[in-house]
């Protein structure tokens, strides 16, 4: 029997406003709606069904790669339907797939209700801006909205290095060089090394996962470029720890000095279900100032959190607890959701 029409399935994902589609054998197709998985009213799939559907979307070369490595990551554009980030993998010997919807229309900072301070930090000429959070917390969307804002107002050359390329920006005032790891460049580290010779003003690094990439990002931020990057950390202080911990003991003082001088901001976000449907992003915002730079340089990262709580009306900083309290006051989220997502549940419980 012929398998389901994968394009129709992907079309329905977009129509429902879902974020993801999962195809796993022995269960019906499932979509993620407002953060929760929901089965689609269709028969259960077999591994053969899924393989047939998946193979109809890829090239011979991609098929060979998948058969050799059992993993395949790629971006997919289906005209008239949308763009997707796709991952094929195996489970108990069967082919399985996950598709993430990538909006073709790139949101503005106002569309995503981003805090005002985001518009300030992206005006910086150089430095490192990190957007962090678990998978599916909206990091790519926040970064795309920031670059979109720059694209409307400034004439810059923006190089993005991603695996795979997600949001594709039209050249409004900026020119964008989108580079996909695997297609356009061998690795993040290599792309960053050569980016320096490509006259960029702004560099976006899809993922800072290894020492080489982090080192290249810090160097680029120090040498007069505005660098955007992502990490899978859940709070601003833990992001700084993570970067420093990638390096060996004798390298750490130098890395702390580089971070102290080049870090502009860390935005750690969590996407949570909103009352009445939809989702809302709670952001912890660290903006580097003189005091924070000193704490990083002197290896006193544990004191950063209390520093973030001072003079916030002037600094634009906020802790995650404050973001959650604000949403609770505005009736956007439930108490249970706030407690579930809180980085420091006892601090939130006390405040409540």
Image: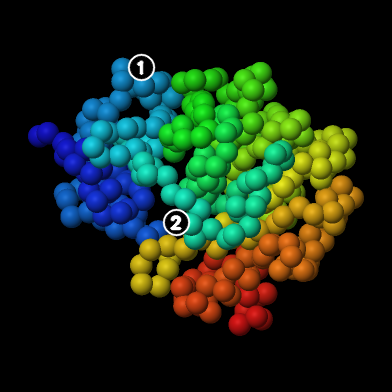
Which quadrant of the figure contains the N terminus?
top left
**What residue is pinned by disc 1?**
61
Where is 216 relative to 126, above or below? above
Disc 1 and disc 2 in contact, CB within 8 angstroms: no
Q: Secondary structure at mark 1?
A: helix
Q: Secondary structure at mark 2?
A: loop
Where is 197 relative to 340, above or below? above
At 63% from the left edge and 57% from the top edge, which residue is drawn? Answer: 117
Nearer to the camera, 139 or 233: 139
In the visual, does 117 lie left or right of 178?
right
In the visual, does 198 lie left or right of 271?
right
Of badges 1 and 2, nearer the viewer stands: 2
**What residue is pinned by disc 2?**
111
Where is 265 relative to 46, above or below? below
Q: Position of residue 40 (x, y in %)?
A: 22, 54
Q: Disc 1 and disc 2: Cα gap in Å?
A: 39 Å
Mark 2, Cα crowd under 10 Å, few <14 / some 14-19 / many 20+, is few
Q: Position of residue 72 (x, y in %)?
A: 41, 29
At 52% from the left edge and 72% from the top edge, which residue is drawn? Answer: 327
Q: Position of residue 147 (x, y in %)?
A: 54, 42
At 58% from the left edge and 75% from the top edge, which residue is drawn? Answer: 325
């Amino acid at each position: 029997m012929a398998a389901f029409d994968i394009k129709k399935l992907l079309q329905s994902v977009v129509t429902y406003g879902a974020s993801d589609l999962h195809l796993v054998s022995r269960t019906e197709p499932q979509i993620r709606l407002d953060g929760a998985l929901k089965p689609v009213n269709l028969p259960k799939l077999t591994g053969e069904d899924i393989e047939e559907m998946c193979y109809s979307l890829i090239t011979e070369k991609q098929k060979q790669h998948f058969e050799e490595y059992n993993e395949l990551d790629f971006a997919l554009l289906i005209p008239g339907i949308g763009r997707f980030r796709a991952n094929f993998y195996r489970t108990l010997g069967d082919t399985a797939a996950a598709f993430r919807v990538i909006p073709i229309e790139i949101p503005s900072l106002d569309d995503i209700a981003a805090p005002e301070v985001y518009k300030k930090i992206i005006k910086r000429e150089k430095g490192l801006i990190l957007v962090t959070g678990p998978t599916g917390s909206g990091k790519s969307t926040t970064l795309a909205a920031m670059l979109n804002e720059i694209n409307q107002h400034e004439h810059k050359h923006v190089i993005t290095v991603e695996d795979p390329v997600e949001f594709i920006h039209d050249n409004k005032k900026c020119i964008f060089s989108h580079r996909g790891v695997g297609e356009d460049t061998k690795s993040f580290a290599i792309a960053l090394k050569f980016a320096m010779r490509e006259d960029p003003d702004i560099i976006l690094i899809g993922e800072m996962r290894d020492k080489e990439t982090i080192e290249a990002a810090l160097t680029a931020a120090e040498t007069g470029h505005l660098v955007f990057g992502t990490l899978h950390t859940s709070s601003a202080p833990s992001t700084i720890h993570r970067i420093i911990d990638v390096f060996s003991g004798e390298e750490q003082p130098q890395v702390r000095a580089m971070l102290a001088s080049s870090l502009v901001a860390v935005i750690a976000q969590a996407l949570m279900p909103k009352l009445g449907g939809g989702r809302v992003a709670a952001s912890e915002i660290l903006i580097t100032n003189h005091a924070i730079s000193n704490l990083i340089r002197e290896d006193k990262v544990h004191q950063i959190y209390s520093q973030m709580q001072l003079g916030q009306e002037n600094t634009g900083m906020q802790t995650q607890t404050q973001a959650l309290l604000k949403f609770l006051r505005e009736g956007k989220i439930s108490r249970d959701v706030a407690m579930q997502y809180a980085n420091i549940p006892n601090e939130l419980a006390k405040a409540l």
